[in-house]
């Protein structure tokens, strides 16, 4: 996939488990959580409102690092036909199995 640009990279302030990212020239976030997640069945990132990204975190209050990227096209759909899928970033899989420590 080509044509990607990083628009946010660093620490974000979290309040009530939420971070709002919006374009500099756009309208400020109006607080409509359901509009941000419109068309999604689950997920941590709501991006249905143009110029706004609503992130839910596991941290209630503090700082959390994240990166937001804008791509020219959506990734290829590798899900079986007919399955609903969220437009979420993929998370890494489980860590590799550790070897037992000899006694």
Image (tube, helix red, strand yellow):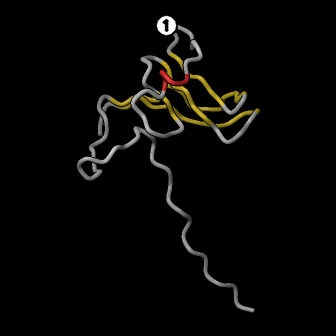
**Looking at the rendering, which quadrant does residue 44 occupy?**
top right
- Quick check: 51 left or right of 101? left
Location of residue 1 with respect to 46 vertically, above or below: below
The quarter of the picture where residue 30 lies is top right
At x 37%, y 43%, the residue is 85
Relative depth, front residue between 23 and 87: 87
| Rendered image quadrant of residue 70 | top left
Q: Which residue lies furthest to the left in this view?
A: 81
- Under circle 1, the secondary element is loop
**Residue 41, image x, y percentages:** 44, 38
Residue 103: give x, y in percent of width and height.
Answer: 75, 92
* Label 1 crowd (10 A; few <14 / some 14-19 / many >=20): few
Q: Is residue 66 left or right of residue 3?
A: right
Residue drawn where x is 57% and y is 31% of the image: 55
Q: Is residue 37 left or right of residue 3?
A: right
Please tell me whether residue 31 is drawn above or below residue 17 in the rendered image. above
Marks counted in the figure total 1
Residue 90 position in % (x across, y down): 45, 47
Residue 48 is left or right of residue 64, and the answer is left
Please give the name of the residue rendered at 65% of the width and 29% of the height, measured from the top-left corner. 18
Where residue 75 appears, as percent x and y from the top left, is 31, 40
- Name the residue located 36 percent from the left edge and 31 percent from the top edge: 71
Relative vertical location of residue 69 with respect to residue 32 in this rendering, above or below? below
For mark 1, what is the residue? 25
Q: In this view, does 1 lie above or below 22?
A: below
Is residue 24 or residue 57 the one in the foreground?
A: 57
- Name the image quarter holding the N terminus: top left
């Amino acid at each position: 996939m080509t044509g990607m640009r990083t628009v946010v990279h660093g620490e974000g302030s979290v309040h009530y488990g939420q971070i709002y990212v919006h374009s500099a020239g756009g309208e400020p976030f109006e607080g409509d959580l359901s509009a941000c997640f419109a068309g999604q069945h689950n997920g941590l990132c709501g991006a249905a409102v143009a110029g706004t990204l609503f992130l839910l975190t596991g941290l209630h209050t503090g700082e959390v690092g994240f990166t937001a990227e804008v791509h020219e096209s959506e990734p290829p759909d590798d899900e079986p036909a007919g399955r609903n899928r969220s437009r979420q970033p993929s998370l890494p899989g489980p860590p590799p199995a550790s070897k037992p420590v000899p006694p």
